[in-house]
Image: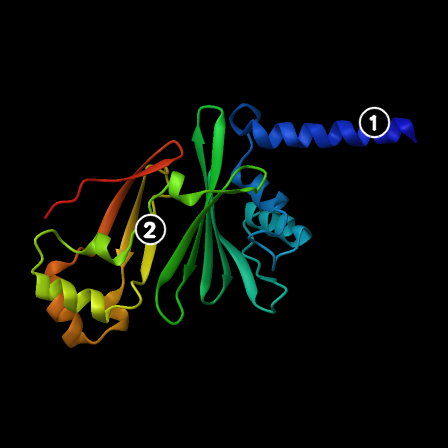
Amino acid sequence: MTIILKQMKGALCAVALLLTSTVAMGVEIKDLFMNEPGVVFELLPEATRISMVSYYENEQDVYATNRAGNSSHIIDLKPRHMSIEMSAGRKVELALLIQGKDSAIMVIEHFSIPYPDAVVTFYDTRWKPLKTDKLFKTPTLESFIKPGTPAQVLRDITQNVSFPLIDYELNADNLSSMTARQHLADFYTATDYARWKPYLYETLNYTITGKKITLTPLKK
């Protein structure tokens, strides 16, 4: 029994070392997806996630039924990025951001129903939550308003827009950039948006360096 317990302890230590030293040990995002403890993928049991990766790598586009009764499948899988459709209206992106020997997992939850919107969160490689504001400044409605906007227009926008509706587009090929896009035109009337459009940026561009995501200087 003592020998078995020692072997189990050694195995657990090996797993911890593997997840901590992601660069040195060659851990990919799929490994972190399969080992995720139910923080993000509470609707997908571990066995289901392992099967999803196996089917995808064997070029089989198989849909798995999650705990909510919806169909889930892997849309894209790269060493440091993957995209999973959880249901018809929800998609989850995972990106492994590496800086030296340190790493972070960026999670983007996309919601397309009833209107495009998204939430960005961060975790370490053991799926412990990290403070988002230390890695990424979440854009607000004011972030999309152009400098020099007349005061009356500024009041019009801020008093009437209750839901900024911001989604994100990640450069999945090299994880070097990300775009935040506002979707006010999808929710508010064409008349309202036409009045605001000249004073709004449609997108904000971010540069990703290691674990840090920095807003690229905007042009008027």
Tell me, yes or no, if residue 78 can be seen here.
no
Q: To which residue does mark 2 refer?
A: 169
The image's mark for residue 6 is 1
Q: In this rendering, would 75 be left or right of 9?
A: left
- Residue at x 40%, y 34% (from the top left corner): 211
* Residue 80, position as x, y percentages in the image: 47, 38
* Residue 83 vertical position relative to residue 104 in the rendered view, above or below: below
> Could you tell me residue 107's position as x and y percent?
46, 48
Return the x and y of residue 214 as percentages of the image width and height.
29, 38
Q: Is residue 211 left or right of residue 52?
A: left
Q: Quadrant of residue 194?
A: bottom left
Q: Position of residue 155 (x, y in %)?
A: 15, 66
Q: Above or below — where is 11 with respect to 40?
A: above
Front residue of 64 and 41: 41
Residue at point 61% right, 63% down?
66
Describe the element under mark 2 as helix, strand or loop.
strand
Which amino acid type is marked by label 1? Lys
Q: How many marks?
A: 2
- Classify 10 Å Cα crowding around label 1: few (below 14), some (14-19), many (20 and above): few
- Rendered image quadrant of residue 191: bottom left
Residue 171 sits in quarter? top left
Q: Nearer the viewer, residue 57 or 81?
A: 81
Q: Which residue is farthest right?
A: 1
Which secondary structure, mark 1? helix
For the point 22% across and 55% down, the residue is 142
Q: Is residue 46 left or right of residue 192?
A: right
* Quadrant for the N terminus in the image: top right
Would you place residue 5 above or below residue 165 in this image?
Answer: above
**Is residue 89 depicted above or below 166 in this figure?**
below
